[in-house]
C-alpha cells in the first residue's frame, strides 16, 4: 500500500489530498476531539474544585469570567485562523516557503497581540468586570480570576495559536499531545494552588494559565525538534507585508466571530443575573458540560479545515463537496448520541459540580434545552471553518453576523421578555436550526460557483 512505504510527512499530505472523505474527516477530527475533550477539563476541573469550596458565588464568578477567556482566544484566533488558512492553501499549491514564512509570522504576531491584550485588560479591569455582570457577591472573585487570565494571556494565546498552526499542516496528533500535557498539568496544579497554597479562585486561574504555558512549550518542542512538516525560520522573522495582510484578511473576521459570541454570552449572563446569582452558577455549570458536545462539532470542523484549504489550493472542488457532505453526516450522528446521554443524565451531571438543589434543578433544565442545538450546529460550524480555509472570511463572518446579531441576540431578548427564563434558554436552539440551512446552502453554492469558473 502507498501509506506503508511513505514517510510521516507524505502520509499527512495523502490524508489531505487522497484519503476517502469520511475517513479523512474522522482521521483529522477524532484526535482533535480527543484533545479538546481533555481541554474541556480546563474549565470543568476549575469548576469542580471551586465547587468543593461550597461557595456558589465563586462558581458564578468563574462563569462570569469565561468571556474574558473567549476574548483572549478571539484575539489569538486573528492569527491562528488567518495563518492556518494561508498555510493550508500554500501547501495545496506546493509553496512550502510561503507556508514557513506564514508560520514564523504567526508566532511573531501572537507575541505582539498578547502584550496589547494584557496591557489594555489590566488598565480597564474594573469596568470589564462590571460589564461581565459581576455584582456585589461576585465582583471580587471575578476580578481575581480575570486579572490572572490577563497577565498570562501570552501563554494562553501562544498555546491556541500553536495548536491551530500544527493542525493546518495536518499534524493533528502533535497538537493533541500539547493539549494533553497542558490539561494534565492543570489537573495536578488546581488542588495545589486552590487548597494547599490557599489561593482559592486566583489559584484556579494560575493553574489554567500555567497549563496553557506547558501546552505551548510542548508544541514549540516538536517544531524545533523537526517533528513537523514546517518549522519557524529565523530568516523569516521579519514579517512580509503581503503575508501579514493575508493573515489579517482571514483572521480579523474570525476574531470578530468569537467576539460577537462573547458579547452574546455576556448579554445572556446579564439576563440570567435577573433571575438570581445562583441561576448564573447553574447556567455556568450546564454550559461547561455542553462544551463536551460543542467540542465534538468544533473538532470535526477544525479537522476539516485543512482538508478544505488544501483542496481549494489544489482546485479540487469535487473533493471539497465530498468532504463537506461526509463531515456533516459524521458530526450530526455523533452529536445525536451525545444529546441522548445529556437528556438521560442531566441532573446527575450537574450534581457532580454542586449539591445545591436549586443549582441542580436549574442546571438540568438548561442542559436539556441547550442539548437540542447539537444535531444542527455542526453543519454551521463546518461551513464557517470551510470559508476561512478557502480564504473567504467575509462569508464566514456573514454567517456569524446573522447567527449572533440578527437571530440569537434578538431572540434572546424577545423570548426572555415574553416567556421569561424558559424563553431565554430556548433562543439558541431556535437560532441553530435556522442557521444550519443558511450556512450549508451558502457554502455549497460557493464551491459550485468556484468549480464552474475553472471549467
Image (spheres, rainbow, N blue to C red):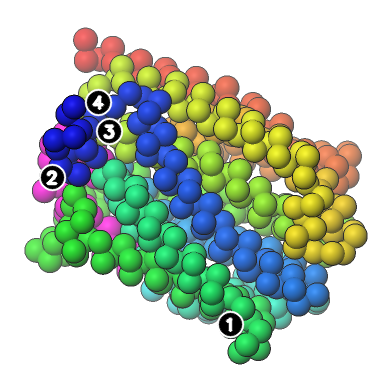
Q: Residue at x 29, y 48 (%)?
A: 171
Q: Report which residue position mark 1 lands on.
A: 192
Classify 10 Å Cα crowding around label 1: few (below 14), some (14-19), many (20 and above). Answer: some
Q: Where does residue 441 sit, x and y in percent of width and height?
A: 50, 19
Q: Nearer the viewer, residue 162 or 274?
A: 162
Q: Nearer the viewer, residue 93 or 445?
A: 93
Q: Report which residue position mark 3 lands on.
A: 15
Q: Are the residues tagged 3 and 4 within 8 Å (C-beta)?
A: yes
Classify 10 Å Cα crowding around label 4: few (below 14), some (14-19), many (20 and above). Answer: few
Relative side of 40 to 120, left or right: right
Q: Is residue 277 visible?
A: yes
Q: Report which residue position mark 2 lands on.
A: 96
Q: CA distance from mark 3 to mark 2?
A: 17 Å
Relative side of 340 to 307, left or right: right
Q: Report which residue position mark 4 lands on.
A: 18
* First in sequence: mark 4 vs mark 1: 4
Q: Where does residue 123 sit, x and y in percent of width and height?
A: 53, 79
**Residue 152 image label:** none
* First in sequence: mark 4 vs mark 2: 4
Q: Secondary structure of the magenta portion, mostly?
A: helix
Classify 10 Å Cα crowding around label 3: few (below 14), some (14-19), many (20 and above). Answer: some
Amino acid at each position: 500500500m502507498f501509506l506503508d512505504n511513505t514517510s510521516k510527512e507524505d502520509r499527512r499530505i495523502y490524508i489531505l489530498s487522497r484519503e476517502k472523505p469520511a475517513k479523512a474527516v474522522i482521521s483529522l477530527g477524532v484526535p482533535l476531539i480527543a484533545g479538546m475533550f481533555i481541554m474541556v477539563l480546563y474549565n470543568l476541573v476549575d469548576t469542580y474544585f471551586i465547587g468543593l469550596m461550597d461557595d456558589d458565588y465563586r462558581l458564578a464568578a468563574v462563569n462570569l469570567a469565561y468571556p474574558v477567556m473567549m476574548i483572549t482566544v478571539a484575539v489569538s484566533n486573528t492569527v491562528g485562523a488567518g495563518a492556518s488558512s494561508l498555510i493550508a492553501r500554500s501547501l495545496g499549491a506546493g509553496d512550502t516557503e510561503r507556508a514557513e514564512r506564514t508560520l514564523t509570522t504567526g508566532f511573531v504576531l501572537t507575541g505582539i497581540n498578547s502584550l496589547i491584550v494584557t496591557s489594555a485588560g489590566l488598565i480597564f479591569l474594573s469596568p470589564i468586570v462590571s460589564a461581565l455582570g459581576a455584582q456585589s457577591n461576585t465582583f471580587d472573585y471575578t476580578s481575581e480570576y480575570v486579572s490572572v487570565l490577563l497577565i498570562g494571556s501570552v501563554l494562553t494565546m501562544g498555546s491556541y495559536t500553536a495548536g491551530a498552526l500544527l493542525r493546518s499542516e495536518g499534524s493533528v496528533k502533535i497538537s493533541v499531545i500539547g493539549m494533553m500535557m497542558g490539561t494534565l498539568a492543570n489537573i495536578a496544579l488546581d488542588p495545589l494552588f486552590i487548597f494547599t497554597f490557599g489561593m482559592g479562585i486566583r489559584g484556579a486561574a494560575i493553574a489554567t494559565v500555567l497549563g496553557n504555558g506547558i501546552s505551548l512549550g510542548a508544541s514549540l518542542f516538536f517544531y524545533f525538534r523537526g517533528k513537523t512538516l514546517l518549522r519557524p525560520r529565523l530568516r523569516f522573522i521579519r514579517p512580509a507585508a503581503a503575508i501579514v495582510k493575508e493573515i489579517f484578511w482571514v483572521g480579523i473576521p474570525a476574531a470578530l466571530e468569537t467576539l460577537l459570541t462573547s458579547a452574546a454570552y455576556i448579554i445572556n449572563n446579564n439576563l440570567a443575573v435577573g433571575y438570581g446569582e445562583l441561576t448564573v452558577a447553574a447556567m455556568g455549570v450546564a454550559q461547561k458540560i455542553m462544551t463536551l458536545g460543542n467540542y465534538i462539532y468544533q473538532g470535526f470542523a477544525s479537522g476539516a479545515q485543512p482538508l478544505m484549504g488544501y483542496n481549494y489550493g489544489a482546485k479540487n472542488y469535487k473533493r471539497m463537496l465530498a468532504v463537506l457532505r461526509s463531515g456533516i453526516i459524521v458530526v450530526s450522528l455523533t452529536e445525536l448520541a451525545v444529546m441522548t446521554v445529556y437528556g438521560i443524565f442531566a441532573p446527575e451531571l450537574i450534581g457532580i459540580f454542586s449539591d445545591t438543589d436549586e443549582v441542580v434543578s436549574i442546571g438540568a433544565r438548561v442542559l436539556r434545552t441547550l442539548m437540542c442545538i447539537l444535531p444542527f450546529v455542526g453543519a454551521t460550524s463546518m461551513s464557517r471553518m470551510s470559508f476561512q480555509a478557502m480564504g473567504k472570511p467575509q462569508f464566514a463572518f456573514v454567517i456569524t453576523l446573522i447567527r449572533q446579531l440578527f437571530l440569537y441576540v434578538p431572540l434572546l431578548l424577545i423570548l426572555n421578555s415574553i416567556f421569561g427564563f424558559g424563553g431565554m434558554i430556548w433562543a439558541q436552539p431556535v437560532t441553530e436550526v435556522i442557521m444550519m440551512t443558511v450556512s450549508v446552502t451558502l457554502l455549497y453554492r460557493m464551491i459550485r460557483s468556484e468549480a464552474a469558473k475553472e471549467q
